[in-house]
Amino acid sequence: MYETLALYIDGEFVSGEGRKTQDVVNPATGDVLGQLPHATQKDLDRALAAAERAFQSWKVSSPMDRAAVLRKVGQLSRDQAKDIGRNMTLDQGKPLAEAVGEVVSCSEHADWHAEECRRIYGRVITPRNPDVRQIVVREPIGVCAAFTPWNFPYNQAIRKVAAAIGAGCTVILKGPEDSPSAVMAIARMFHEAGLPKGVLNVVWGDPPVISDYLIRSPIVRKISFTGSVPVGKQLAALAGQHMKRATMELGGHSPVLVFDDADIDRAAKMLAKFKLRNAGQVCVSPTRFYVQEKAYEEFLAKFTEVTKGVKVGNGLEDGIEMGPLAHQRRVPAMSKFVEDAKKRGGKIVTGGEPIAGPGYFFAPTIVTDLPEDSMLMTEEPFGPIAPIVRFKDTEEVLKRANSLPFGLSSYVFTNSLQTATKVSNGLEAGMVNINHFGSALAETPFGGIKDSGIGSEGGTETFDGYLVTKFITHI
Ligand code: NAD
């Protein structure tokens, strides 16, 4: 059974009553899965009022109570992972194993915030005057508006919700209208876990209309957005205009540096599979492959062999390793990258075209011989396309890797400790992965620098964006 689609406001699931709806479509088949209700302005006002009211008691709730709800959600999430994952494959397209894996691993975000929320500390500052007591306390910032995307619909939403709720904030979450089932499941589980009404509210609708209304509302004190750089900049600008704190987890164009001394066979096999995870629709996807001259031919041959062997199809079928793109609009977006690459002298080693049939499929694609200023080397592809180019030495590749305005993730393969140290110091990125993929765990901070964002999610940094500092002095 696909999730029942509704708004979740003040502890109630609401739909119908003449509200506008939109079709939710299976990207593997084009079939309509359900109707998603859009929030009216009255709904948004109700959600704002509920979140404001609930904040008065939630902000002073015991961390033990907040932890209990989060722990329960972690458990429910594990128990229901198969069903939630199946629905995510239906409305987002990723292979079932990836979808279920996303739910299971993200149950840990609920656990982590349950643990960490008991460790929100202040401090005592030694006073100049011994009769004075100076204390710093950290308090929840208030009502938060969160906007989450369609590529990891479960992961992106639970991270924001768990952090806000764990900190003692209340939230209005607008999830991805194209792939809404994961966010519906999150609302359902928090409801079942006994979260007081109004602490979490879920709304749907036209993204710019909803974000504009919520960010301008004087009730909202903080916003958190995951999505593209241009939209993030618009939302951060609006937040700035209204002096609201913003956490931004935006796009990237992650460089991969493969040095001659690396285990080339291992690197090529690992990277080819990792590149096609979620059909490349991953903000930290490896997207610019720089391979040192001597290793280049061997790397390209192995990477191509693995890429060609990846089984593409409906994510519900056995053995499928890559599903469709999440929406129809992403197919022409991929073709545009390929057209530009061809015009710029790029060679298509494999793929390069949409796959015929129902659904929004694009063939896993490898492009070589691209100039540095081509579209594929400068704009985030957000799809199953890998540009692979050569480099000569460390200084040169660092310069090229750092040449874009993005700074999210980066990947390095080398067996030299000296090289690893040099590039991990030199890469302008929020995350550096050397010889393995280790980002996005609950206990590690996730976030970008430069145009890729502001702030981190996860790790001990996770509550920073949701707390304000208050200084108290008395004599
Ligand atoms: P898009 O820029 O139209 O939308 C990206 C996301 O932002 C969607 O979830 C959308 O609902 C939301 N959005 C758009 N305008 C908004 C607004 N004014 N207020 C609030 N939310 C808004 O592009 P798209 O075609 O959906 O996705 C493609 C691009 O989005 C990619 O190039 C990629 O860079 C980016 N993206 C990034 C992430 C990420 O994890 N950082 C996730 C999804 C999409």
Image: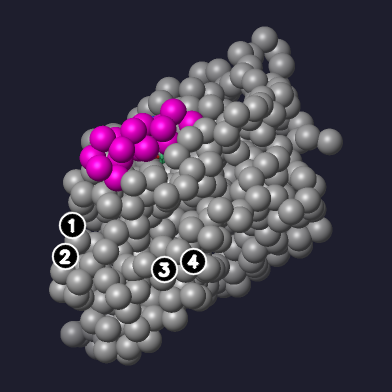
Q: Which residue is mark 1?
A: 403
2 vs 3, front mark: 3
Residue 312, position in %: x, y? Answer: 64, 45
Question: At 63% across and 60% down in the image, what residue appears?
Answer: 106
Q: Which residue is mark 4?
A: 302
Q: Which residue is mark 2?
A: 399
Note whether residue 148 is visible. no
Checking the image for residue 299, the label placed there is 3
Q: Residues within 10 Å of mark 4 (few under 14, many from 20)?
A: some
From the viewer's perspective, is residue 51 above or below residue 290?
above
1 vs 4, front mark: 4
Q: Is residue 19 left or right of residue 445?
A: right
Q: CA distance from mark 1 to mark 2?
A: 6 Å
Q: CA distance from mark 4 to mark 2?
A: 26 Å
Residue bounds of the magenta highlight: 331-346
Ligand 1, seen in the image, is in the quarter at: top left
Amino acid carrying label 4: it is: Lys
Are circles 1 and 2 on residues that touch, CB within 8 Å? Answer: yes
Residue 160, position in %: x, y? Answer: 51, 52
Are circles 4 and 3 on residues that touch, CB within 8 Å? Answer: yes
